[in-house]
Amino acid sequence: MQSRMNKAIVAALGAVALIVPMAACGSSSADSGNSLTVYSYYNKATMDPVVAAFEKANPDIKVQISYGQGDSEYNSTLQTRIAGNQAPDVFNLNGNNRADLMNNGAVADITGAGYLKGIDETYLTDYTKDGKIYGMPISGWLAGVVYNKDLLKEVGYDSVPDNLDDFAALAKKLKDKGITPFLENGQEMSGSLIGLLGSYYASTGTDGDKEIYAGKSTFADQWTKAFEAWNDGFIKSGALPQEATGLNADQVKQSFINGEAAMYRTGGWDVADIKAAGVNYGFSPFPAYPGSEPYVDGGADPAFAISAKTKHKDAAEKFLTFMNSEEGLELFTTAYGSASVSSNYTSDIDEQLKPLYDDYFFKGKFHWVSFEKGSTAMSAEVIAQQQGIQGGTTTPTDAAKNLDAKWSSVQ
């Protein structure tokens, strides 16, 4: 009889991906009256309740909001509007557009603004340049390892081990029972790899990514050991099967929900589906780099920013003030399924996920990679190198060197 592990891979690879065409949308800044143009990274379901409440609290301001359709489309449309002198009054900075927009003077300096009160500087760091703040994130995300408690119990475990050796031992026991140990989306940067990278940086006391961006270090110096640990703990151990290299997020989730995979990398965005499927689940951080402490993936969500050329500064500032109010935060984080990073509101977080926020995210034990240059090309290169390691065609040492070569090409 075919094992559950093989069924997970075969079923997932056989799934049909549905591609939904998405149209770009945008509107130009209005020059008259008290209208406010907002171009949102967040979708209509998330922002409509917020806008309605804002307009009710500010009846003299009419919000004209339009929405992006995914990271790439959002960023390209925003750049086009800014280049055409039709920048929205308020827009969002994210990991792939923030460096360019902060560097080219498109974003207003909001350093010292009263509406930033309650947001710890930890979450403002990504939206700060040369000591000046340009974006206001109000929520944060994290991802860790979600696990099926019943499947782990079958092999004698109550939770996911916090070190790589014991994690590899768990993976072997699961494999021996025909259960796929661990899966993750193979079409994006590996969350388990980046969790290990953050854990490695914690052991060195330095954010190696920032050293690379500043020209003070290299990927060979900073990433090789994390690549090696990932290769040993996840790949050579068989925890992350080679056959799963190309799986997408939905395929991975379905394997877990079907009881074919015991663990996978995800965050709060999948909790509703996991609950609906009746899975007895828990969350844990990623296993730690040897000699360090566990980390999760995470960071501040895309920040709200004001155009440097806005003609409606007062209205824009009122909008950001509302976003960081108790009412705005509750509406936004509830609709988006994220956690507030502002002391002005405490989000209601899933009880299984809450320990990861309390013990890791809110204590700064999280990491994610946001390249300051050539983000699209660099992300694609990381994916190519991790797939090479997973497939046995690339060594950790060569993978890091290849990232250095790509980094040089995008300068």
Image: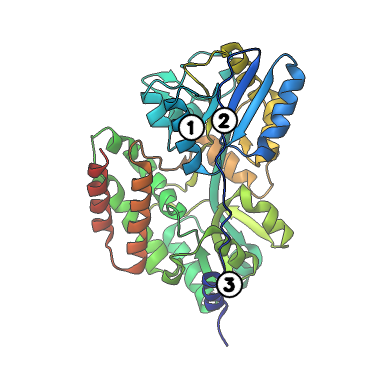
Query: Where is 166 relative to 97, above or below?
Result: below
Of residue 195 and residue 78, the one placed in the foreground of this image is: 78
Residue 57: where, in percent of width, then height?
Answer: 75, 18
Q: Residues under labels 3 and 1: Cα distance?
A: 51 Å
Find residue 42 and report its horizontal and vertical position in percent: 60, 37
Q: Are marks 2 and 1 in contact (CB under 8 Å)?
A: yes
The foreground one among 105 and 4 is 105
Answer with left or right where residue 271 lies relative to residue 113: right
Residue at the spot of label 2: 39
Residue under circle 1? 78
188 lies left or right of 396? right
Q: Secondary structure at mark 1?
A: helix
Q: Amino acid at mark 3?
A: Val
Which part of the image, by quadrant, shows the N terminus?
A: bottom right
Name the residue type under label 2.
Tyr
Which mark is in front, 2 or 3?
2
Q: Secondary structure at mark 2?
A: strand
- The amino acid pointed to by label 1 is Leu
Question: Which residue is identified by label 3?
Answer: 155
Disc 2 to disc 3, C-alpha distance: 50 Å
Number of residue marks: 3
